[in-house]
């Protein structure tokens, strides 16, 4: 499913697994999965940080994806609502996420659910 988020990115299963395992052991990470039978159809990952800007806890949705063939069934809405509820339960004052500029359908989805575009994400590769 992560290939649907980053279709042009070269992904290494072993590197993804190593990062995922680190997250599972971290008290600052939470994951949500939606399954149908034994098939994963939705996934969200949250990271929590103590933010000076927020003067408290900030929840960041690091990854958020619904299997393409399952979109339009309300899975994404329920998954995002669960992520927001989890953030609220952990004391977060705000939930943030970023989305690639070309993902206009995703932007509309987030706006319809109360998220606002409040800035830009700047990134510089180091490796």
Image: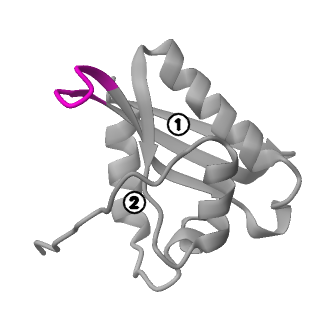
Name which quarter of the figure residue 55 lies in.
Answer: top left
User: Is 60 located above or below residue 89 in the figure?
Assistant: below
Q: Quadrant of the N terminus?
A: bottom right
Q: Earlier in the sequence, mark 2 or mark 1?
A: 2
Q: Position of residue 107 (x, y in %)?
A: 59, 62
Residue neighbourhood size for the residue with mark 1, other residues' Cα within 10 Å, grouped as few (<14), some (14–19), many (≥20): some
Task: Tell me, yes or no, whether the highlighted magenta stretch contains residue 35.
Answer: no
Q: Quadrant of residue 105?
A: bottom right
Q: Is residue 107 left or right of residue 59?
A: right
- Which stretch appears magenta? 49-57
In the rendered image, the vertical position of residue 22 relative to residue 11, given as above or below:
above
Q: Is residue 51 magenta?
A: yes
Label 2 environment density (alpha carbons within 10 Å; few <14, some 14–19, many ≥20): few
Mark in the foreground, 2 or 1: 1
Q: Residue at x 29, y 62 (%)?
A: 121
**Spot occupied by residue 22 in the image (x, y as percentages of width and height):** 31, 40
**Left or right: 56 as drawn, with respect to 17:** left
**Place of residue 108 in the rendered image (x, y in percent of width and height, measured from the top left):** 66, 61
Q: Which mark is residue 31?
A: 1
x, y percent for residue 58: 34, 29
The residue drawn where x is 13% and y is 75% is 127
| Residue positioned 62% across, 52% down in the render | 111
């Amino acid at each position: 499913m992560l290939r649907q988020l980053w279709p042009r990115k070269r992904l290494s299963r072993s590197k993804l697994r190593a990062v995922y395992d680190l997250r599972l052991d971290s008290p600052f990470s939470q994951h949500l999965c939606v399954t149908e039978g034994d098939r994963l159809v939705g996934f969200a990952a949250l990271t929590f940080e103590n933010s000076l800007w927020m003067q408290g806890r900030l929840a960041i949705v690091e990854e958020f994806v619904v299997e393409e063939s399952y979109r339009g069934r309300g899975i994404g809405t329920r998954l995002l609502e669960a992520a927001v509820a989890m953030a609220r339960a952990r004391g977060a004052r705000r939930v943030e996420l970023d989305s690639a500029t070309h993902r206009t359908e995703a932007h509309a989805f987030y706006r319809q659910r109360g998220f606002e575009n409040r800035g830009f994400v700047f990134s510089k590769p180091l490796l």
